[in-house]
Image (cartoon, rainbow, N blue to C red):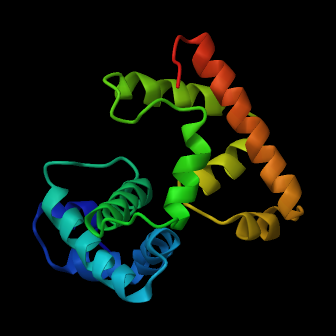
Amino acid sequence: MADIIELLERRDEEALVLLREKYSDYCYSILYRILRDHERTEEALSDVWLSIWNSIPPARPARLRAYLAKIARNTALHYLEHDNARKRSGVTVLLDELQECIPDPRWEGERELKELLEEFLREQPLEQRKLFLRRYWYGETIDELSQAFGYSPSRVTGMLFRTRKRLEKYLQKEGYTV
C-alpha cells in the first residue's frame, strides 16, 4: 500500500479512500466530542477530508495522525464559531476552565505561548500530561477521563485543577498574566 501522504501529493484520489478507511473513526471521535451532534459531525468530517486534500501538498506532515487531529479539531471549532454557539457547550466549558490560567488566544505572542505550553507539559508527570491533553485538546469529558484512568470524577477534576494552577504559576513566572 502506497503512503497516504505520497498519494495526496500525487493528487491520487485513492488517498481519500485510504484516509476514510483508516482514520474515519479517529477523526469522527474528535469532531463529535466538540460538536456533540451526529449530523454536524458528519458534515464536519467531510470538511476534514477536503481540508486534507487541499493542504497536502504543500504541507507534508511528519505525523499524519497528529495532523488529522489538528485539522479535525480546528474544523469542529470553526463549526462552533460559525453556528455562533453561545450556549454552554462542552467546548465553552473547556475554554472557561483554561481561561483562568491562559491569556487571550488572540494575544500577539501566540507562538511563544504555544512553546511555553509544550515546555510546561513536558515537565509534568506522564499521567497528568495525558489527562490534561485528553481534556483540553481532545475534549474528553470528566466522566470519560474517570473511566479511562480509573479515578473518581472528583479526583480527575482535582488533578486538572491543580495542573491548571501550576500552569498559571508557570506562565506568570514567564511574564504572562491573564
Q: Residue at x 80, y 65 (%)?
A: 146
The quarter in which the N terminus is drawn is: bottom left
119, 154: nearer the viewer? 154
Q: Residue at the far bottom: name it.
A: 39
Q: Residue at the far front: name it.
A: 86
19, 158: nearer the viewer? 158
Residue 21 against residue 130 in the figure, above or below: below
**Percent coordinates x, y for residue 8 in the rendering:** 18, 65
Residue 16 against residue 132 in the figure, above or below: below
Q: Residue at the far left: name it.
A: 11
Residue 127 in sight from this viewpoint: no
Q: Residue at x 53, y 19 (%)?
A: 177
Q: Residue at x 28, y 82 (%)?
A: 43
169, 19: nearer the viewer? 169
Q: Is residue 122 left or right of residue 34?
A: right
**Percent coordinates x, y for residue 53 in the rendering:** 17, 66
Q: Is residue 134 left or right of residue 22?
A: right
Q: Residue at x 38, y 55 (%)?
A: 70
**Percent coordinates x, y for residue 175 in the rendering:** 53, 11
**Percent coordinates x, y for residue 137 in the rendering:** 53, 53
18, 111: nearer the viewer? 111
Q: Quadrant of residue 45?
A: bottom left
Number of labels in the image equals 0
Q: Is residue 168 left or right of residue 118?
A: right
Residue 21 in sight from this viewpoint: yes
Residue 149 against residue 128 in the figure, above or below: below
